[in-house]
Amino acid sequence: MVDYATVLRKHVTLKCRSLDRIFLQGYVPKLQSVGQVCTFLRWQRGFPIPSSAAFGKIGARYEREVETFARKDSIPLIRFKKGDVKEDIAQLYLDAAARKGKTGVVLIGVAQEKASVWRSWKAKGQENAAHPHMEWGRQMAFINHFYFYIWDEDWGPTFWKTNAYAPFSIWLWLNGHEWAKRQLEKAGIPYEALDNGFRSCEDPRALQRICNRLGPKMVLNYFWRWYWRLPSPFSAEDVRAGYVYEFAFRQIEISHTDVFDQPAAGRAWFEGIIRDHLDIGRPDQVVLLFDRRLTKRTHTRWRTRILYQGVDPILTCYYKSSRLKQYFKEGRALRTETVICDTHDFGIGRRLCAKNWNALREVGQAANRRLCDAEMKDARPAPDVVTFEQVTRPSKTQDGQPAPAIRFGDPRTMAVLAALVSFCHL
């Protein structure tokens, strides 16, 4: 097996460090407590009795606006069925928008999913009162969610998910590689795509500078650009009154990609790495990769999984709710990726801000680097078949004299080979 350093030095044509998938949840801070909910309904919206019925009227109006929006712009509205793969259905519409280069909502999907919503009920003993006192609480319920699949001029394929029930949460899905592609196109730098990554780029340094530039400001620009285009349960007056969304990290992926000129060389090396690193999920290994202390209160399962999707193996190790995975993308590039599902695993806040963004990026890049360094340190190159035959079988010297075979394993033969290897670097 060829060692990691040799593979990278001789066969890697492009390296790229970038954020990959970004999944955020939007929430309105002023709708997170019972008092705030009642204030919104009574003083902001003018309902005399704050109740679920009042929120129901707001939600019903929002649903009508979504249907009107889809009808006005001739946007397909599909109700997803159980078992449907939403991404596969939406991909057809996104690909069509990409070919046309047209920015806009390409599909609205409706799916019934579970979510936490505000509910009210009459207080005990107030069932028959003319003006009953209402009690409030958060409950889980199956409700309709609206998926707005958007082709964006800066981000390419994205989706925006929301529902018609208070507190009217929003979920955003974005991709850092797709954002970088749009920036390269605007700068006029030719590149070749590799799924949601890069296979080649005419200016690799400019590509890396673009990937490094991605930050929360670009995410918020995307949000506000579409917030005023899409239907919303909040009016402009609500926004001016402070009912504004903030965002928290639900999942973020930090990736490192090495593109090979000869995929067979990288693939053979990677499969050898899998055989040699089946124990990478042990506590001491995970500590080295993620640089986190382990105590008796660290509740998690230490494990390594080897997944085979078709014929492509994926090496994955876990730390709490986060994981580090490595796989070959499209048989061409080695992708090392840290997936952080709970920022608290690393003592980082969930709120979307520059401080947390940079801290998460550093954690992911450090973990990716440590895994590659561990593989480089542990890889022990073994002779390939051709080299082994050249050394051990009879041959002719440069002056035409025959050289007898040397029996591999013989003590004197091994001593000669050891001496040769010791001085070959001279």
Image (cartoon, rainbow, N blue to C red):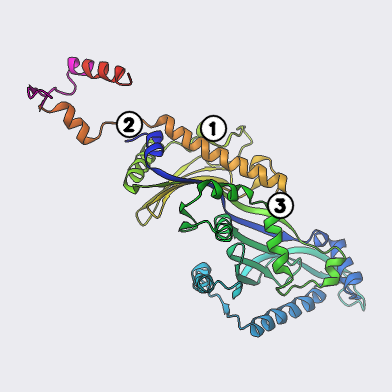
Amino acid type at mark 2: Pro
**Residue located beneath label 1 in the image:** 288
Instruction: Look at label 1 and name its amino acid.
Output: Leu
The number of numbered discs placed on residues in the rendered structure image is 3
Q: Which residues are magenta?
A: 396-415
The percent position of residue 95, horizontal first and vertical second, equals: 50, 70
Going from N to C along the chain, the mark reached first, 3 or 1, is: 1
C-alpha separation, residue under disc 3 versus residue under disc 1: 27 Å
Secondary structure state at the residue bearing disc 2: loop
Farthest residue, direction front: 188
CA gap, disc 2 and disc 3: 44 Å
Q: Percent x, y for residue 371?
A: 49, 37
Instruction: Pick the residue in front: 304 or 253.
Output: 253
Asked if disc 3 and disc 1 are in contact, CB closer than 8 Å, the reply is no
The answer for how far apart the CA atoms under marks 1 and 2 are is 23 Å
Q: Amino acid at mark 3?
A: Leu
Magenta portion: prevailing SS class: loop
Q: Position of residue 257 (x, y in %)?
A: 48, 47
Tell me: 250 left or right of 269. Answer: right
Residue sitting at x 69%, y 83%: 68
User: Where is mark 3, residue-wise?
Assistant: 352
Q: Which residue is mark 2?
A: 381
Which quarter of the rendering shows the N terminus? top left
Residue at 21%, 32% (x, y): give it: 387
Residue 286 in the figure: left or right of residue 422: right
Residue 251 visible at all = yes
